[in-house]
Image (cartoon, rainbow, N blue to C red):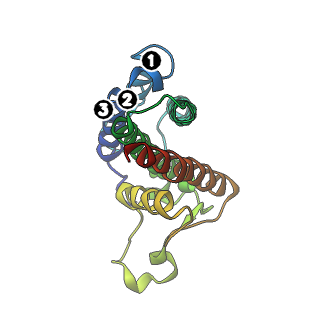
Amino acid sequence: MQRSEPRWPAALALLGCLGLYLLLPHRLEVGPRFLVPALLGLPLVPLLAVRHHHPNDNPLVRRLALALLALVTTANMVSVALLVQRLLDSHVSQGRSLIYSAASIWATNVILYGVWFWEIDRGGPGHRATATHTAFDIQFPQMENPSLAPDGWRPQFLDYLYTSFANGTSFAPADAMPLSARAKCLFASESIVSLVTISVVAARAVNILR
């Protein structure tokens, strides 16, 4: 049996999201000041409780973590909507602040979807390590061409984070391809948020700077 994947990279990524959200202006926050940071902090408890994911982890804990991740992802989408609404206000003149806000929201989006991909692909990290879940959600180049990777290779968190980054910048899959319906929905929703943030928000903010 292969060793399960460490949890700390995902925990570190969520801590990064927490810091980015705290940098947002009050007008772009969803609910009370510390509501979303608290929701971000809760999934860190199971991630940091033990060092590795295992298939016999309590499924209720994983479902709760995924539910909290969904809430935080929704909150980030609402922040995008609030930012767009603010940009549509003809009296807005703080273009530099808006660019920083757009960059923070975009980076948060990339990190959150990186965690999503890591958690859903083939049943999660624990099942990938033991090959107990064979339904592929995301196909990496190393799977098609095993000669390109070391023996026993399997995707780690950094692979999923890079996949999220590539999808968030090109608005389409790069090297890793979504296979399942849920993976395609995640890829599409990330692309939509990135498209709005980059093309609409950034373009408007740059226009204000002139």
Q: Position of residue 71 (x, y in %)?
A: 55, 29
Tell me if residue 136 comes above or below residue 35 in the rendering.
Answer: below
Q: Are marks 1 and 3 in contact (CB under 8 Å)?
A: no
- Count of numbered circles in the view: 3
Which sits in the foreground, 129 or 41? 41
Q: CA distance from mark 1 to mark 3?
A: 13 Å
Residue 2 shown left or right of residue 130 in the figure: left
Q: Position of residue 131 (x, y in %)?
A: 51, 60
Tell me if residue 136 comes above or below residue 92 in the rendering.
Answer: below
Amino acid, disc 2: Leu
Which residue is tagged 2?
Answer: 24
Q: Residue at x 36, y 31 (%)?
A: 44
Which residue is tagged 1?
Answer: 35
- Disc 1 crowd, CA 10 A, few/some/many (<14, 14-19, 20+): some
Quarter of the picture holding the N terminus = bottom left
Q: Residue at x 44, y 77 (%)?
A: 142
Identify the secondary structure beneath mark 3.
helix
Q: Residue at x 50, y 22 (%)?
A: 30
Residue 49 shown left or right of residue 86 in the figure: left
Upstream in sequence: badge 1 or badge 2: 2
Q: Are marks 1 and 2 in contact (CB under 8 Å)?
A: no
Which sits in the foreground, 154 or 35? 35
Which residue is tagged 3?
Answer: 19
Amino acid, disc 3: Gly
Residue located farthest toward the bottom when viewing the structure as drawn: 147
Residue 54 visible somewhere in the drawing = no
